[in-house]
Image: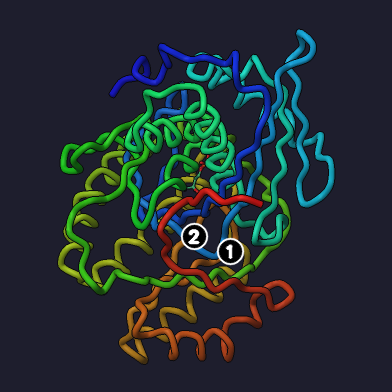
Amino acid sequence: MTEKDFIPTSLNTSTLQEGKYTWKTPSNIALVKYWGKKDNQIPENTSISFTLDACFTLTTLEFEKKKSEKANFEVFFEGKKKDDFKPKIATFFERIEQYCPYLSDYDFIITSRNSFPHSSGIASSASGMSAIALCVMSLERSLTTEINDNYFYKKASFLARLGSGSACRSIKGSIVVWGNHEEIKGSSNLYGVEFSDEIHPNFKNYHDTILLVDEGEKQVSSTVGHKLMYKHPFAQERFKQAEENISKIKEILKNGDLKAFANLVESEALTLHSMMMTSTSYFILMKPNTLKIINKIWQFRQKTNLNLCFTLDAGANVHLLYPENEKEQVNDFVVKQLIQYCQNNHYICDRVGKGATQTSI
Ligand code: DP6
């Protein structure tokens, strides 16, 4: 599909006066990372992620026919009016306008909350943007008879991408690929697709325990970080490596090789942070406790021969990934040895989930 396929042809906004839609959308954690993009939110390389379950955003989009010429929307987050969230959402609405011309016929109230603390350092843009995108698609579905489920979810992911790249991977479960890769059937730079190849039972119900090392705001946003890849001396090699890692992980997900999985996923996390440390300007998002946790994980793995591994997103928090049948030993290890490195002993137990769901509240 191309961008043009997402421009609706027959829509009728004359009868629908008002309404509301609510979606619950999960966060996701990348195994092969997206870091570097071209214009229009086109990724420099393919990425793949686990969709999460316990970390989600719940968003309601209320709409009514516009009363004045000026487009109007208000944002409420966790019960409070949030004017500082408006510029990002306004940019998102501008980017999707040509694909959703009906937006200019309505006024909106967006009400949102996260299942995780906003200041936890967990990226909320993925779940947040995908939730708004799905609400917008529910509105579109009410205005035309021409939408099937396949189009609905593809376009939702397409719109979410225009809000935040990684958000396009927060629509479906349990594993999602974003970026055109020759070995992944149906993959696209424009939207995320469910990884439909064979998945070994080892990866069913995979756990992600998120250790909240630093709950503050990030010093460098992902958007700034992506831009620093433009003139990065190692960028081209990195993009090539990511494509190769997609081929490798595809094989690993099929054959269930947990040692190879740990190896690849940890290397991806450290490569992401190496890119940050070697860009101009350079920066470090890991904290001393991030490194302490990593070393503890390596010692634990050596001692137990279990398959616990880590990944990082653009921050100091550590995601612990492990299979279902190791959860008792890992939980014991977390409680006894790792929570001392978490801010206020905070951590979140999550696992691979099934994707976004529509609800009513
Ligand atoms: C490190 O999707 O937050 O989490 O497209 O500018 O909104 P924008 O960036 P964003 O970048 C996420 C980067 C990452 C890796 C990943 O999720 O693949």
Q: Where is residue 21 in the image (x, y as percent from the top left)?
A: 60, 40
- Residue beneath the point at 59% across and 37% down: 132
Looking at numbered disc 1 in the image, what kind of residue is underneath it?
Answer: Asn
* SS of the residue under disc 1: loop
- The N terminus, quarter of image: top left
Identify residue for label 1: 317
Task: Report crowding for label 2: few under 14, some 14 to 19, many 20 or more residues within 10 A (C-alpha).
Answer: many
Q: In this view, does 21 lie above or below 291?
A: above
State which tag comes first along the sequence, 1 or 2. 2
Which is more toward the observer, 27 or 23? 23
Q: Is residue 76 above or below residue 318?
A: above
What is the quadrant of residue 61 in the picture? top right
Q: Where is residue 112 in the image (x, y as percent from the top left)?
A: 69, 46
Q: Distance between the residues labelled 1 and 2?
A: 7 Å
Which is more toward the observer, 279 or 210? 210
What is the quadrant of residue 344 in the picture? bottom right
Q: Is mark 1 within 8 Å of ligand 1?
A: no
Looking at numbered disc 2 in the image, what kind of residue is underneath it?
Answer: Leu
Q: Where is residue 26 in the image (x, y as percent from the top left)?
A: 52, 54
Task: Report crowding for label 1: few under 14, some 14 to 19, many 20 or more residues within 10 A (C-alpha).
Answer: many
**Is residue 228 in view from this perspective?**
no
Q: How many labels does the image show?
A: 2
* SS of the residue under disc 2: loop
Q: Is residue 356 above or below residue 318?
A: above
- Direction from residue 23 to residue 190 in the image, left or right: left
- Residue beneath the point at 72% across and 51% down: 217
Give the residue at the far right of this rendering.
80
- Residue beneath the point at 37% across and 23% down: 146
Q: Are the residues tagged 1 and 2 within 8 Å (C-beta)? A: yes
Give the residue at the far top of this rendering.
69
Identify residue for label 2: 312
